Amino acid sequence: MDRVAIESGFRVTVPKKMRNGLKIGDELRVTVDYAGRIILVSEKQIRSTLQRTAGMWSGRRDIPNDGVAYVNRLRKGRRLRRLGVTRRAPR
């Protein structure tokens, strides 16, 4: 594990061996995990990953284009089951 110092203005220098794929001007997302470690993720990598996974869901007729509506429908079904209210499938 590399050790880095936080400079004036909270500037952190990424060690050279960890700069693979980073370019000047790239935007990074910063977060801290439960162990207190600083996590840097390239915005470009996030978008690339989301594009790959979004493509596998496109064109499906059982999932609406509005993902929010789909999740709400799933949650509604869960709530109804918890309450003991179930819809019977049509025969």
Image (cartoon, rainbow, N blue to C red):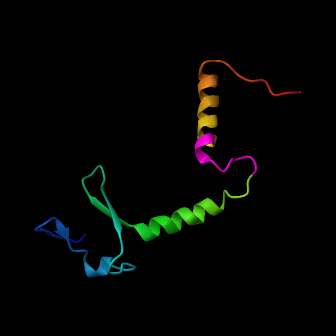
Left or right: residue 18 compared with residue 81: left
Q: Which residue is drawn at 25% across and 74% down?
A: 14
Q: Name the one closer to the observer, 56 or 68.
A: 68
Image x and y of residue 61, in percent: 76, 50
Farthest residue in the right direction? 91
- Point out residue 88 in the picture as x, y percentages from the top left corner: 78, 24
The x, y position of residue 41, in whole percent, is: 37, 65
Residue 81 highlighted magenta (yes or no): no
Q: Which is more toward the observer, 38 or 9?
A: 9
Tell me how many marks there are.
0
Location of residue 2 with respect to 66 vertically, above or below: below
Against 79, residue 28 (above or below) is below
42 and 84: which is toward the camera:
42
Main SS of residues in magenta: loop
Vertical order, 75 against 6 (above or below): above
Where residue 2 sits, quadrant-wise, is: bottom left
- Which image quarter holds the N terminus? bottom left
The answer to whether residue 64 is left or right of residue 75 is right
Q: Is residue 18 left or right of residue 87?
A: left
Query: Is 24 located above or below residue 84 in the figure?
Result: below
| Residue numbers of the magenta segment | 61-69
Of the 4 image quadrants, the one containing the C terminus is top right
Quarter residue 75 falls in:
top right
Q: Residue at x 63, y 36 (%)?
A: 74
Instruction: Say which residue appears at 66% left-offset and 56% top-offset.
Output: 57
Residue sitting farthest toward the left: 8
Residue 5: % across, % down: 14, 69
Q: Which residue is drawn at 61% across and 30% down?
A: 76
